[in-house]
Amino acid sequence: MNYWRAVLLVAARDLKVELRSREQAVTLLFFALLVLVVFNFAFDFTVIDFVTLGSGVLWVAFIFSGVLAISRSFQLEREQDRIQGILLAPIDRSAFYLGKVAATVLFMAAVEAIVVPVSVVMFNFRFSGRIALVVLELVLNTVGFAAVGTLFAAMTTRTRRGELLLPLLLFPAAVPVALAAVKTTTHLLAGRPFERYASWVALSAAYDLIFLAASVLLFDYVLED
Amino acid sequence: MIAESGPVVPAIEATGLGKRYGPVVAVESLDLRVTPGESVALFGPNGAGKSTLLQLCATLIRPTAGRLCLFGTNASSSDASALRRRIGFLSHQTFLYEHLTGLENLLFYARLYALPDPVSAALESIRAARLEHRRDDRVGSYSRGMQQRLAIARALMHRPDLLLLDEPFTGLDRPSHARLEATLEEERGAGRTCILATHDLGQGLRAADRVLVLADGRLLLDRAARGLDQGFLEALMTANSASGRAAS
């Protein structure tokens, strides 16, 4: 089977299951919005500059809802041992990995598309008209997080207490992408010139490339019992 | 039909095959040769290694010892992806998505196997499973028996050369049971190789040409099914089950 058709097939199936069940979308969105509300009440943003805390608030919401998305995505494969149905198919197993990454990126992007405008209204800030850079930053860091998260979720999915292991493995590995995301967002909120944070954007891009390439190469072994 | 000119490439050829999970031995030093078209019943008490052996043959797990070749290709080779196209596997689990309809489930697998006309293949399979009237209902609303019928349809849809069936009669009512027996007979007639793991000795003896009995991951018996006595098999398995050994 054509490699990219298999990627699309896996991603489309995840999306279709989610559209039917709506379990993930509702949980992710409410979790992310709850984070915003909690931070809004915890800090007095008339006194504290949102630029200082805003990037942290946004990425706490995105990263934790991302963990939920990845965890739920592999729960789907664990139930009824469906992952075996995929492993039996005559496809390159890395196509399954890329399909899962694509679906996770779409789920996280849908949450971000709602949370960013809501936070703009709630915290009264603006990205100084740099929408293209904001989108680029969100895409790069979301792909990086989904890439590493999907790899570790696949590693732990066939183990006992896999859901407990996932955050233990994922968070240390996601530190570079989390740092780059928070730093880039801070600079974007402050309206600083691109040169000031270009290195963080480069770090995100390099992280994406390295993790995606390594995962595609290693995924067959990752799924070994 | 077997060609007279060359040697027959076995559907399954295992030499010293072993699978360990840490200290637990699931399959040990197993030598096995199954010729194409052969129908084999796999018996054994719980924990004997039947499911592990089927998973090894399905290329879902790699052996920790020995060598396994399927249709002349090493099952652990990088070519296993092409090999998997020739395998149909039915496990204890259905592999079905409860939020998708019966037809959508079959379509997903038909596309995953890159069947030339996935829609026709899925429709034909759901018709064969006698679930056409429920094809647009979500699988979550199906009974256990209906899910099992759909799972069987999924395993057979791509017309595999090697059928690996782990307790396929589970959850089936009497008519579905009879239909599955007829389907297995058809598959046998079509020259497909079939390994059927079951606890139903009578069923296995009726469906197979050959019987294998496993206990503690070892092959205890490898004989032609014809003339084998069910009582003898029961006694053999009881004596070699963990509880049987404890009692003696």
Image: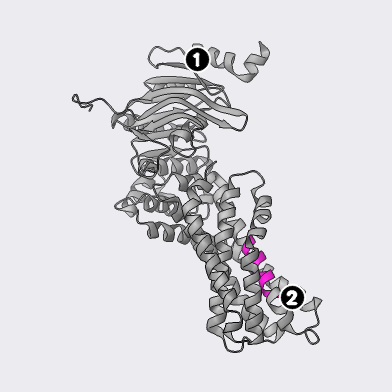
Q: Over which residues does the magenta segment extend?
A: A57-67
Q: Amino acid at mark 2?
A: Val
Q: Are marks 2 and 1 on the same chain?
A: no
Specify whether B247 is left or right of B21: right
User: Which residue: 44% across, 37% down?
Assistant: B58
* Residue A180 to residue B53: above or below: below
- Nearer to us in this view, A70 or B43: A70
Mark 1 residue element: helix
Residue A62 is covered by the magenta coloring: yes
Q: Position of residue B113 (x, y in %)?
A: 37, 49
- Nearer to us in this view, B51 or B71: B71
User: Disc 2 to disc 1, how far (Cα)?
Assistant: 67 Å
Mark 2 residue element: helix
* Residue A138 to residue B215: above or below: below
Toward which corner of the image does residue A130 lie, by quadrant? bottom right
User: Which residue: 44% across, 55% down?
Assistant: A95
Please give the residue where the numbered disc 1 appears in the rendered image: B233
Q: Position of residue B232 (x, y in %)?
A: 50, 11
> Quadrant location of the C terminus of chain A?
top right
Q: Chain of mark 1?
A: B
